[in-house]
Each structure stands twice: as C-alpha cells, then as structure tokens.
Image (spheres, rainbow, N blue to C red):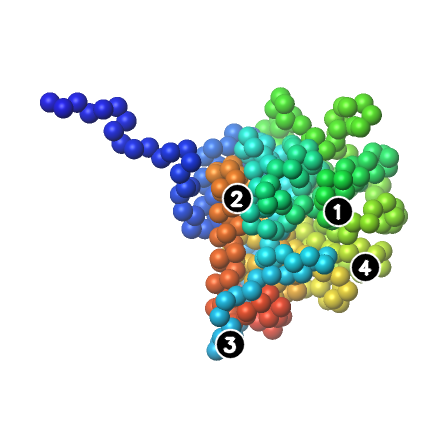
C-alpha cells in the first residue's frame, strides 16, 4: 500500500567521514579502482623488471625487531629535530609528480593534509600546482621543502630556487639519481606521454616567456653543480638518491645538510638495492655528521621503526600518499598520516622505546631467513 519513497536508504553524505582505514595497503586497492589504468601504471610502476621496486618492500621482511621490556615511559614522544625545527613525527611526504592525476585538488589536497599533521611535504618540481598555490593552500600551513631536478640552464634553475624560497620552502631536495629518466616499460607500453589538458608542471613555467618548459634529466650533473647550488641558496640542501657510502661521504665533504637514501621507488636503476639494505653503510659512512633520511617501501609503522633503528632520522613515503589521494582525497592523506603515526607509536611501545632516539642498531636482527 504505502509506496517506498525514492532514496529511502540514507546515502553517505558527501561530507561524511571516510570509511575507517586499517592498513596502508588498503588504499592502493581502493585507488586502483578509481584511477585511469594508464595513470595507475604510472604511479605504481618501476624501471626494468621492477626488481628494485619489489625489493624495497620485501627487504623489510629480512629485519626483525628485538624488543626491550619493562621500560615504562607512558606516552610516546615521536618528535624529531631536523634543520633546527621540531617535526611531530619522523615521517615526511616524499616528492611525487602529478598529484592532479590522482585527484582534482592535487597538491593542494596533499598540502592541507600534511599541514594538519604538522609534518613536511616535499613538493615535486613536477607538481601540477604552482609552488605558490601549494604554499597558500593549507591552514595551518604545511612545512614545505622543494624538490629540484637541476636543469642545464643555470639561470632558469636559479629562478626556480628563488620561487621556492619566496614561497617559504624550508629546504631544497636535490634529486641526484636521475641523470636520465628510468626506462619504465608500463609507461612505454601504455604510451603515457602527455598530461591531460589544463594539467601542467607549473613550477617549470619560464618567467620570461610564460611557457612551461620540459623537465630535463641532465647526465652532465656532477659535484661541481652541488657546489654551485651551495653558493646559490642558503636553504638546507638534501641530496636525494644516495645509495653508495662513498657518495654519502662526498655529500658531507661538499657541505650538504642531509642525504636521503633512496632508489626513487625503484623507478630509476633497476637492480639497485632496496633502500633499507643500503641504509646501514650510508649511516656508517656519514658517522653522525649530517642526518640520514630514507624512502622506499615504507608501508607500516614497523618499517619506520626498523629504518630509524638502522640510523635514519626520518623516512619518506611516496606511493602511499598518491594512493590515499586517489582513493579519498585530502581526508585520505590525513588518515594515512594518522595511521602511520599510530602504528609507529604502538610499535615503539611494544619495542620499549619512548622516543625515536631510543631506537638503536642492536634492536635489529638482520639477515634473517625469509
Ligand atoms: C609516481 C611517482 C612519482 C615520483 N616523482 C618524483 C619526483 O618528481 N621527484 C623525485 O625526486 N622523486 C619522485 N619519485 C620518487 C619518490 O620521491 C620516492 O623516492 C619513492 O616513491 C619512495 O618509494 P615508495 O613509493 O615505495 O614510498 C616519484 C615516485 C613515484 C612513485
Ligand atoms: O616519475 C618519476 O619518478 C619522476 O620522478 C618524474 C619526474 C619528472 C616528471 C614526471 C615524473
């Protein structure tokens, strides 16, 4: 008799809380369902046979955490110091290109989530939002670092650095693992070349012509260019993509402020070691003179714990941020950062560490058979 009104079942309002998030990896499955397959492959993929890409995650299986007990301590204190600033947790957002392919709000959404978490977003030179707009997006403002591919045109490179400085970026992250673009079969097969209309690398806009330049991967880059950068900016310089301990030593000798142990998420040299496997030798070579950071394969609080115990001061996350953005936008990135923070706090509690500094090398058993 009574007719059922249309939409009798309440629908989730657009502003409702996103569904709970149980594990970082769930975001990837969710993102995959939403993304154009070509863009999904661009975000997910690596170079060559993707050996290094796979190794980044599986390498964490080879480390076991030896917990301390009866250490008390109550509340965990996850704060760390970097370049004279206090960060609320030892997790940074590593630079990833093209956030507007993941979500219409792109880097603006990421910056808002990072601002809420109080940590650092490293904005890619290949961002699809101008650095000024990313800097103005978040309240509270996100701490931004700017990632640079040094361009052969020094004048243009200096102008990009000036823009990043003027926008309030607090460090320059110089990517040194890309003298040439890695060969990524998935992108070649998919013919992924162009960004959709209206989506551009806004940080590559030429101040004179107003045109957007292509990013050049420069195989002539050498330590002299790092010296040039050292003279060109007073911002702290982070070299991203260090794997060899001799390069870490050279970085210190060239007055660099930090190194980021990374293989670019397996997207450059396939066959390079997992970043966590390269970490201990870099930490030893640096000998505490500058902070060592790490990215690649971080998916769990226990991964962060292992990296810190092996000597990293903080870790970066790349793909999880892209998946969170594609799956759930700004709330997704907030949830991701909240989840990693909670997982790290719990893992530290279980391992008997109150602060990151309590995590020491002896707490890691390595070379366990997996
Ligand atoms: C889709 C994508 C785009 C990336 N773009 C950049 C970039 O523009 N600049 C850069 O230095 N690194 C870039 N990277 C590398 C990341 O900064 C980081 O080293 C890597 O993603 C870490 O590994 P993870 O994805 O396992 O966390 C990119 C990585 C991915 C997956
Ligand atoms: O895809 C990448 O890993 C990357 O670093 C990049 C750099 C410039 C443009 C697009 C992607």
**Which corner quadrant of the image does residue 286 belong to?**
bottom right
Q: Name the one closer to the observer, 177 or 350.
A: 350
Sequence-wise first label, 3 or 2: 3
Q: Mark 1 or mark 4: name the one nearer the start of the chain.
A: 1
Is the Cβ of the residue at disc 2 closer than 8 Å to that at disc 4? no
In this view, 9 is above or below 89: above
Labels 3 and 1: the sequence-earlier one = 3
Q: Earlier in the sequence, mark 2 or mark 4?
A: 4
159 to 312, vertically: above or below: above
Could you tell me if the residues under marks 3 and 1 are in contact, i.e. CB atoms within 8 Å? no
**Residue at mark 2 to residue at mark 4: CA–CA distance:** 33 Å
Q: Residues within 10 Å of mark 4 (few under 14, many from 20)?
A: some
How far apart are labels 3 and 2 at the CA level?
33 Å
For disc 3, the marked residue is 71
- Whether the residues at callouts 3 and 2 have beta carbons within 8 Å, the answer is no
Residue 272 seen by the camera: no
Any atom of ligand 1 within 8 Å of the CB at mark 3?
no
Q: Quadrant of residue 155?
A: top right
| Residue 45: image location, x then y, percent | 59, 40
Q: At numbered mark 3, what does the secondary structure look like: helix, strand or loop?
A: loop
**Residue at which label 2 appears:** 333
Q: Which residue is mark 4?
A: 252
Mark 2 or mark 4, whichever is nearer to me: 2
Image quadrant for the N terminus? top left
Foreground disc of the pair 3, 4? 3
Q: Earlier in the sequence, mark 2 or mark 1?
A: 1
Q: Residue at x 47, y 33 (%)?
A: 34
Per the rendering, the mark at residue 172 is 1
């Amino acid at each position: 008799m009574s007719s059922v009104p249309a939409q009798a079942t309440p629908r989730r309002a657009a502003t409702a809380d996103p569904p709970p998030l149980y594990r970082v990896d769930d975001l990837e499955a969710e993102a995959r369902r939403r993304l154009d397959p070509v863009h999904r492959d661009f975000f997910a993929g690596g170079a060559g046979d993707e050996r290094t890409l796979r190794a980044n995650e599986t390498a964490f299986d080879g480390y076991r955490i030896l917990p301390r007990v009866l250490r008390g301590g109550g509340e965990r204190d996850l704060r760390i110091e970097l370049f004279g600033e206090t960060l609320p947790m030892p997790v940074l957002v590593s630079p990833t290109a093209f956030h507007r392919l993941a979500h219409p709000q792109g880097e603006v959404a990421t910056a808002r989530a990072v601002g809420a978490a109080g940590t650092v977003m490293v904005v890619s030179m290949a961002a699809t939002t101008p650095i000024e707009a990313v800097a103005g997006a978040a309240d509270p403002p996100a701490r931004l670092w700017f990632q640079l591919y040094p361009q052969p045109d020094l004048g243009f490179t200096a102008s990009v650095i000036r823009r990043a400085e003027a926008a309030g970026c607090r460090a320059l992250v110089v990517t040194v693992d890309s003298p040439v673009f890695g060969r990524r079969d998935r992108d070649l097969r998919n013919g992924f070349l162009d960004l959709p209309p209206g989506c551009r690398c806004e940080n590559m806009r030429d101040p004179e012509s107003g045109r957007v330049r292509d990013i050049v991967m420069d195989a002539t880059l050498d330590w002299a260019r790092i010296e040039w950068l050292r003279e060109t900016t007073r911002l702290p310089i982070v070299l991203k993509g260090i794997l060899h301990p001799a390069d870490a030593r050279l970085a210190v000798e060239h007055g660099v402020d930090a190194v980021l142990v990374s293989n670019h998420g397996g997207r450059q040299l396939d066959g390079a070691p997992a970043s966590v496997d390269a970490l201990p030798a870099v930490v030893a070579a640096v000998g505490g003179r500058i902070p060592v950071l790490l990215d690649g394969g971080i998916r769990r609080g226990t991964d962060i714990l292992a990296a810190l115990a092996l000597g990293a001061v903080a870790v970066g996350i790349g793909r999880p941020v892209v998946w969170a953005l594609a799956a759930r936008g700004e709330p997704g990135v907030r949830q991701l950062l909240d989840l990693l923070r909670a997982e790290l706090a719990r893992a530290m509690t279980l391992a008997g560490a109150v602060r990151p500094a309590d995590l020491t090398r002896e707490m890691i058993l390595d070379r366990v058979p997996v």
